[in-house]
Amino acid sequence: MEAADRDLKAELEATLLNRVRSLPPAAFEQLIVDLLVKMGYGGSRREAAERLGRSGDGGIDGVIREDALGLDSVYIQAKRYSEDNSVGAPEIRGFAGSLLGNGATKGVFVTTSRFSSQARDASAAYETHRMVLIDGPELARLMIEHEVGVRTVQTVRLRSIDLDPYEDAEIV
């Protein structure tokens, strides 16, 4: 059963990621904002998150205000790339520049593809900016875990025998 569960989950992750890749850019950006809110960023305040992505957005697709006054924010970059088009160091450096330009210290860069090793190195090199990189497989796992873009259609209950209270008791 565990093997079947793993296979079903892997199939769901792959299918979900393919569907996400086909979303229009604005819908993809909104999905990423919704996912981060569902993960607890911005608290329970729906107005704490905003999709910004549009022409001339300065490399920022969304922002989540972590506190009620908006003093601490997480900036988001979302790239809907095909599986074979990895994110490289230039995109990471561009995002870091956007963070700097907005006076931000935290950023989340999400892609439907993968990050090159140079991109990961570039991200780690910025000491003044804390960047989290979420690739396609991790994105699919997070969406399933936080039920964004998926829903439960069936739950299977597994039961085991528990006669211990009866087997050890003296019946009078």
Image (tube, grey):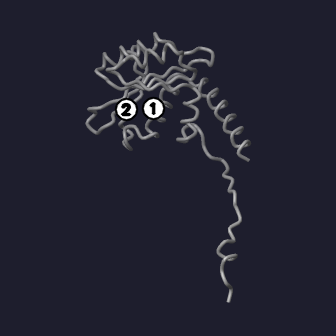
Position of the C terminus by quadrant: bottom right
Q: Nearer the viewer, residue 164 or 13?
A: 164
Query: Residue 170, position in %: x, y?
Result: 67, 84
Label 1 sits on a secondary structure element that is helix
Asked if 169 appears above or below 157 in the picture, the reply is below
Give the mark nearer the N terminus: 2 vs 1: 1
Q: Nearer the viewer, residue 49 or 130?
A: 130
Residue at 40% x, 20% y is 60
| Residue under numbered circle 1 | 33
Q: Residues within 10 Å of mark 2 (few under 14, many from 20)?
A: many
Q: Nearer the viewer, residue 95 or 120?
A: 120
Q: Is 148 placed left or right of 44 in the picture?
A: right
* Contact? badges 2 and 1 (CB < 8 Å): yes
Q: Quadrant of residue 20?
A: top right
Residue extending farthest to the top is: 90
Q: Amino acid at mark 1?
A: Val
Q: Nearer the viewer, residue 171 or 12?
A: 171
Q: Residues within 10 Å of mark 1 (few under 14, many from 20)?
A: many
Residue extending farthest to the bottom is: 172
- Residue 64: numbered disc: 2
- Residue 158: numbered disc: none
Residue at 45% x, 35% y is 36
Query: Residue 39, position in %: x, y?
Result: 46, 39
Q: Is 90 placed left or right of 159 in the picture?
A: left
Query: Residue 92, position in %: x, y?
Result: 44, 15
Residue at 70% x, 45% y is 2
Q: CA distance from mark 2 to mark 1?
A: 8 Å
Q: Quadrant of residue 61?
A: top left
Label 2 sits on a secondary structure element that is strand
Q: Amino acid at mark 2?
A: Ile
Query: Residue 111, position in %: x, y?
Result: 53, 22
